[in-house]
Amino acid sequence: MNALTLPTAAWRDTLVDAGLDAPLAVRIHAAVGGCGAAVRRPLVLHLPGGAFTDGDLDSGLPTARLLAQSGAVVVSLDYPKAPAQPFPAALQAAGALLRWLRRARTRLAGAGTALWVAGEEAGANLAAGLALWARDQGLPLAGQVLLSPLLDPCMATASLREAGQGCADCAIARGWAAYLGRQGDHPYAAPLHAARLAHVAPALVAVGEDDPLRDEGLAYAHALQAAGVAVQTHRLAGPTGWPQALSRLSCLQAPWVAELRPVLQAFLAEGLARCPPVRRAVRCAGRPAPEAGPSAA
C-alpha cells in the first residue's frame, strides 16, 4: 500500500516546559496502525535533519509520519540551530525533552510504554548522541532509529566523494563547522569517534545505496556491533535521494518506504516486548553507566 494512502496520523503543535530558559516547540503525532500492543504504543522522540543549521517540524514531517504509520506516538522537537546555538545546545534541549517524556510517557503512549530516539541526517546525529548521553545518565531507552546519519566531521568517505560532497564549501562541511564551534570532536557531537559505545540502546541504522552518508552510517553500525550493541542495518536500493528526500512528503510514495516501514514496525515491536507492561520503570537495553558529565564517552 502506498504510504500516502494510509490513514494520516493526527498531530498537534504545542510548547513544553522542560525546565530550560524557554519552552520547547514540539509536534506530537498520534500513532497510526499498531505494532502488536493492544493499549500501549512506542513513544519516539524524533529529531529532524537539516545539517545542524536548518530544518524544522515541517521538514521533519515525512520521517515523523513514517514513524507514526509504524505504530508509534511521535514527539518531534524543533531544537536550537547552529551557528547561533552550536553544540551542545541542541543536545541539551533534546535531553531535557527526553526527561520530560519519561515523566509524561503514560499519558502520551499508555502504561508500560518505552522510549526511543530517532532522527534523519543531522537529527540522526543528535539521536545517536542523545542515546550515548542517556546511557551515561542511566536513562533507559528501548532503541535508537538512525536514518542516513550524519556522524563523521572528517567527511572523508567514499560515499561522500561519489556524491561530489565533502569539500570545504559544501552544505555538510558548513553545517559541521557551525555545529561544532570550538568544541572539537566531542563524542556526543561526533558519535562515530566515540571511544565507548558499549551498553548503548539497540540501534536500527538505515542508509540508501546512493546516500552520501551511507559509509559513515555503515561504519557506525559496525562500531556498535563491535561494542556488543544489538544493531539492525538496512542498506536500501537506490535511488533513494537520501538524505534530502527525507524532508519532502513526496518521498513517502517512494519504493523504499514499503521496504522500510515493516522494518520499523518490527524494531518498535521488539523493543516494546523487551519492556514488560509494568508500572515501575525497567531497564530496556544494556547496563546504564553511572551518571557522567558532558565529557564522558
Image (cartoon, rainbow, N blue to C red):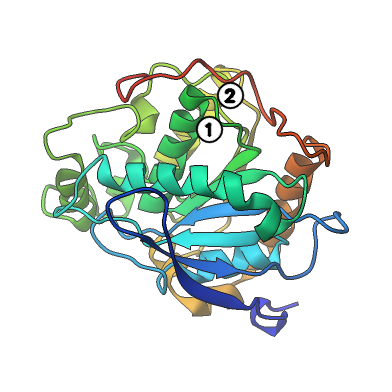
Callout count: 2
Residue found at x 35% / y 60%: 23
Disc 1 target residue:
221
Query: Which amino acid is tagged 1?
Result: Ala
Considering depth in this image, is 82 or 136 the residue closer to the camera? 136
Residue found at x 82% / y 38%: 278
Considering depth in this image, is 38 or 222 the residue closer to the camera? 38
Residue 220 location (% of width, % of height)? 46, 32
* Side of 259 where 226 appears, left or right: left
Considering depth in this image, is 138 or 3 the residue closer to the camera? 138
SS under mark 1: helix
Residue 224 location (% of width, % of height)? 53, 26
Disc 2 target residue:
225
Q: Are marks 2 and 1 in contact (CB under 8 Å)?
A: yes
Query: Which amino acid is tagged 2?
Result: Gln
Against 114, residue 194 (above or below) is above
Which quadrant, please, contains the C terminus? top left
Residue 142 location (% of width, % of height)? 66, 38
Considering depth in this image, is 198 or 166 the residue closer to the camera? 198
Residue found at x 55% / y 31%: 139
Residue found at x 32% / y 38%: 157
Query: Marks 2 and 1, Cα distance to the nearest angstrom?
Result: 6 Å
